[in-house]
């Protein structure tokens, strides 16, 4: 076997393993979507859906909106949200492409995430005022969300 044939065999093996891995991931993702439905609601934000968990009752106080850190999701806030919900309405959510939310369109930057958050809150019928609480990377999204247009 010459060098080109060896490279061809290795490349074919790598591509075969990648195909098997991709197939397995697709099957497992489909199974997980059935086994673990979203605990909150999915709201349309213009072509894709974001997952929101709304807890507590409106009290006349601002709604607390919890923004997770990088690659985190609403489930990271469950204990905080449960405690705060005793005092009023609290929302945690999954940014596009995370948790139960659909993959979004366009850039995945703080400005886009802030726009999508506002659209999701409007779609869910949750109006201002808000208290925005961001953890780590989510702090940039919270800052961007409060900046006037």
Image (cartoon, helix red, strand yellow):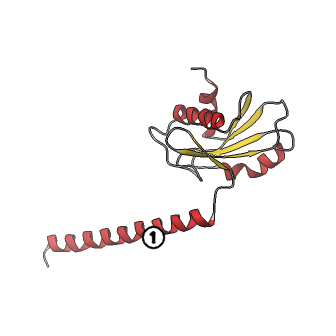
Q: Is residue 24 left or right of residue 36?
A: left
Camera-nearest residue between 29 and 37: 37
Q: What residue do we see at 61% from left, 49% from top?
A: 72
**Residue found at the far left of this picture:** 2
Residue 124 sits in which quadrant? top right
Relative height, residue 22 to residue 73 (above, below)? below
Residue 117 sits in which quadrant? top right
Q: Position of residue 53 (x, y in %)?
A: 70, 47
Residue 113 sits in which quadrant? top right
Residue 36 visible: yes
Q: In the rendered image, which quarter contains the N terminus?
A: bottom left
Residue 140 visible: no
Provide the residue designation for mark 1: 24
* Neighbours of disc 1 within 10 Å: few (<14), some (14-19), many (20+): few
Q: What residue do we see at 76% from left, 41% from top?
A: 90
Relative height, residue 9 to residue 41 (above, below)? below
Determine the secondary structure under disc 1: helix
**Residue found at the far bottom of this picture:** 1
Q: Is residue 97 left or right of residue 17?
A: right
Q: Is residue 133 left or right of residue 11?
A: right
Q: Position of residue 64 (x, y in %)?
A: 75, 36
């Amino acid at each position: 076997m010459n060098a080109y044939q060896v490279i061809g065999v290795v490349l074919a093996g790598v591509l075969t393993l990648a195909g098997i891995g991709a197939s397995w991931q697709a099957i497992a993702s489909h199974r997980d979507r059935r086994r673990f439905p979203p605990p909150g609601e999915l709201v349309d934000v213009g072509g894709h859906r974001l997952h929101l968990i709304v807890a507590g009752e409106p009290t006349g106080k601002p709604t607390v909106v919890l923004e997770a850190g990088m690659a985190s999701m609403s489930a990271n806030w469950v204990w905080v949200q449960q405690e705060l919900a005793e005092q009023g309405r609290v929302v945690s959510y999954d940014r596009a492409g995370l948790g139960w939310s659909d993959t979004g369109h366009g850039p995945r930057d703080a400005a886009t995430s802030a726009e999508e958050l506002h659209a999701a809150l409007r779609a869910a019928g949750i109006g201002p005022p808000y208290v925005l609480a961001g953890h780590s990377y989510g702090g940039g999204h919270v800052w961007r969300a409060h900046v006037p247009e």
